Image (spheres, rainbow, N blue to C red):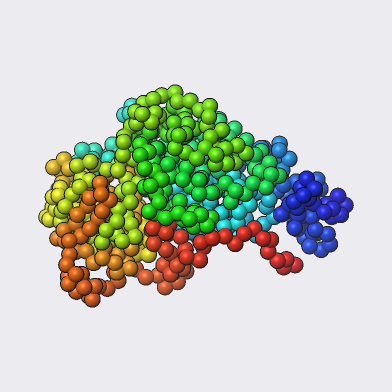
């Protein structure tokens, strides 16, 4: 004990480690802080001023995309130990996209609170965030931003590409299988076979869905080592990256590199430009706005298009293109894309490597131009996420042009309105549904407050009677979100949402909607008198929660254009060590 209780613990004779507030203490308090930790067999010297590194793990067998993260944490630990730190792994709430009801998004803010308070309350000098499935990445980062200690992120990596009937498949094919099954082109037996063939290795969805978009986002912001986004989960190099990240976080503590040093406006702009180049998910916009809110970096939904202007689609990945995340890594991965973008990116943005983003990607190479295209010969000219404005979405709505049908970008047609998702499910396959390919499907009450939790139902299926006629796309508008693996001419995140009594909430079947995506407008043709009359008779038509987390959520969630974070979670409470209670 003498070597641990009699010292003032300072790093390099300068900054005192945060963990010294616990393990460097004398007397009763220091006794208590160390004594219980010793039951894990920790010897004296581990308490003698080594950086304590938390490994914040979203491992869970209920989150299959993250089920291998306990294993990956062992590689992180090896890196921490070799660099002279001491690793302590801890669990936080995990968010599995496929199982959680009503939607994993309802719990993103809750998980972020778990992360924030777990980091702040414990003797941690730095933290490694282990994430994977869609919401786990923004939840961890939002929480860590509100504490702001040295932080590095390690994603679990994508699954290997699935194989069905000797063809490559992945999550985006679910939507196709579903439509083929509803159209009678695929039997239930074939559906079972496809299901067994798709997820054949650990990892998250194998396309540029939301999980890969989030992994791309954090790499583009400089919060991971290069290649984090695309190394397959089962590739040995994923473990190498994890070990190197464990070693690097120890140095980041010594150098006092915090998230606030890296997450500048330039880092956010790099993420937005990169997201356009990779054709990332529409969920990107909502999570990035929430992260900016935590970091105190000014960023609004109106900023996105200006930042990503003239950035074309450079990667040919599903759901917008042909290939899979595994192929993306072999073709050069994200560093190759960012090198192609170098004229546009902020090359001087600092990263966790201790070097600038420009330095990180300067030697990156493309090994397959069919998958990673150069700027002068892109996969598609239109990319990014378009932000629409109009009387139906005063605060904005979003559309992903690379996933949409060009012939529907300008369209005037009658609305067919579903009041909620149950209404949609009950009627969509009705053979007498009064719709044709010119109809605009509208789904209300699936926004942040109205569902609650803003589920991924915005890419509502095409009515069966139209599928039978070979119609594969039509305009769909909702205040909900869409899976990053989905595609179609789908307008999402309408803000303000229907549950607020907005004009979107007043829509009725037969109203004429005008979408002009080229001009970025979305309007309904209704007179002021009709609007006023409807407003007078409008009544909320969504479930109101009376207790528990769902009530907290509905009382405090902000609208989509503000990132759907809680109003009281914007900003940071810092890393100040809280009071002793012994
Ligand atoms: Fe977890 Fe797709 S369901 S990443």
Is 518 placed left or right of 67 in the picture? left
The x, y position of residue 237, in whole percent, is: 55, 30
The x, y position of residue 387, in whole percent, is: 33, 51
- The structure residue drawn at horizontal position 13% and vertical position 42%, both measured from the top left corner, is 469
Does residue 192 show up? no
The x, y position of residue 323, in whole percent, is: 36, 31
Is 150 placed left or right of 136 in the picture? right
* Above/below status of 483 relative to 572: above
- Residue 498, by quadrant, is bottom left
Front-most of 469 and 555?
A: 555
Front-most of 455 and 202?
A: 455
- The structure residue drawn at horizontal position 57% and vertical position 46%, both measured from the top left corner, is 262
Front-most of 73 and 252?
A: 252
- The structure residue drawn at horizontal position 39% and vertical position 25%, both measured from the top left corner, is 369
- Location of the C terminus (image quadrant): bottom right
* Above/below status of 48 relative to 495: above
Does residue 249 show up? yes
* Above/below status of 363 relative to 381: above
Is 505 placed left or right of 160 in the picture? left
Number of numbered discs visible in the structure rendering: 0
- The structure residue drawn at horizontal position 20% and vertical position 45%, both measured from the top left corner, is 408
Is 275 placed left or right of 468 in the picture? right
The x, y position of residue 151, in whole percent, is: 60, 47
């Amino acid at each position: 004990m003498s070597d641990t209780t009699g010292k003032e613990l300072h790093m390099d004779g300068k900054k005192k480690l945060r963990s010294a507030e616990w393990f460097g203490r004398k007397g009763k308090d220091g006794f208590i802080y160390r004594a219980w930790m010793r039951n894990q067999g920790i010897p004296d010297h581990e308490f003698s001023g080594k950086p304590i590194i938390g490994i914040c793990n979203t491992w869970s067998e209920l989150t299959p995309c993250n089920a291998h993260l306990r294993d990956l944490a062992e590689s992180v630990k090896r890196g921490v130990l070799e660099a002279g730190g001491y690793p302590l792994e801890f669990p936080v709430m995990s968010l599995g996209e496929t199982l959680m009801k009503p939607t994993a998004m309802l719990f993103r803010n809750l998980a972020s609170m778990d992360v924030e308070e777990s980091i702040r309350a414990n003797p941690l000098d730095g933290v490694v965030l282990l994430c994977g499935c869609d919401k786990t990445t923004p939840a961890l980062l939002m929480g860590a931003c509100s504490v702001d200690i040295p932080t590095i992120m390690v994603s679990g990596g994508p699954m290997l590409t699935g194989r069905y009937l000797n063809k490559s498949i992945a999550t985006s094919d679910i939507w196709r299988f579903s439509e083929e099954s509803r159209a009678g082109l695929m039997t239930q037996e074939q559906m079972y076979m496809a299901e067994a063939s798709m997820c054949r290795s650990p990892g998250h969805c194998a396309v540029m869905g939301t999980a890969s978009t989030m992994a791309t986002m954090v790499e583009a912001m400089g919060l991971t080592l290069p290649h984090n986004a695309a190394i397959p989960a089962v590739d040995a190099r994923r473990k190498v990256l994890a070990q190197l990240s464990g070693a690097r976080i120890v140095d980041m503590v010594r150098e006092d590199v915090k998230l606030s040093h890296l997450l500048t406006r330039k880092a956010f702009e790099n993420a937005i430009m990169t997201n356009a180049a990779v054709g990332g998910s529409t969920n990107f916009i909502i999570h990035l706005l929430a992260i900016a809110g935590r970091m105190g970096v000014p960023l609004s939904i109106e900023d996105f298009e200006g930042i990503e202007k003239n950035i074309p689609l450079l990667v040919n990945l599903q759901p917008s293109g042909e290939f899979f995340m595994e192929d993306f890594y072999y073709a050069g991965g994200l560093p190759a894309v960012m090198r192609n973008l170098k004229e546009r990116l902020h090359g001087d943005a600092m990263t966790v490597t201790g070097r600038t983003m420009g330095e990180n990607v300067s030697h990156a190479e493309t090994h397959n131009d069919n998958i990673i295209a150069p700027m002068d010969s892109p996969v598609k000219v239109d990319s990014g996420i378009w932000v629409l404005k109009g009387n139906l979405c005063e605060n904005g709505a979003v559309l992903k042009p690379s996933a949409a049908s060009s012939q529907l970008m300008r369209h005037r047609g009658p609305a067919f309105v579903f009041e909620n998702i149950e209404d949609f499910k009950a009627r969509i396959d009705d053979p007498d549904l009064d719709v044709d390919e010119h109809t605009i499907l509208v789904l209300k009450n699936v926004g942040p407050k109205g569902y609650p939790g803003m589920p991924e139902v915005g890419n509502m299926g095409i009515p069966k009677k139209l599928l039978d006629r070979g119609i594969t796309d039509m305009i769909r508008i909702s205040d909900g979100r869409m899976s990053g693996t989905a595609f179609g001419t789908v307008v999402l995140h309408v803000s303000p949402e229907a549950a607020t009594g907005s004009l979107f909430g007043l829509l009725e079947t037969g109203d004429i909607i005008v979408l002009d995506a080229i001009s970025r407008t979305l309007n309904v043709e209704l007179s002021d008198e009709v609007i006023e009359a409807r407003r007078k008779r409008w009544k909320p038509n969504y479930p109101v929660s009376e207790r528990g987390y769902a009530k907290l959520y509905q009382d405090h969630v902000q609208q989509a254009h503000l990132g759907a974070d809680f109003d009281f979670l914007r900003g940071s409470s810092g890393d100040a060590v809280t009071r002793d209670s012994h």
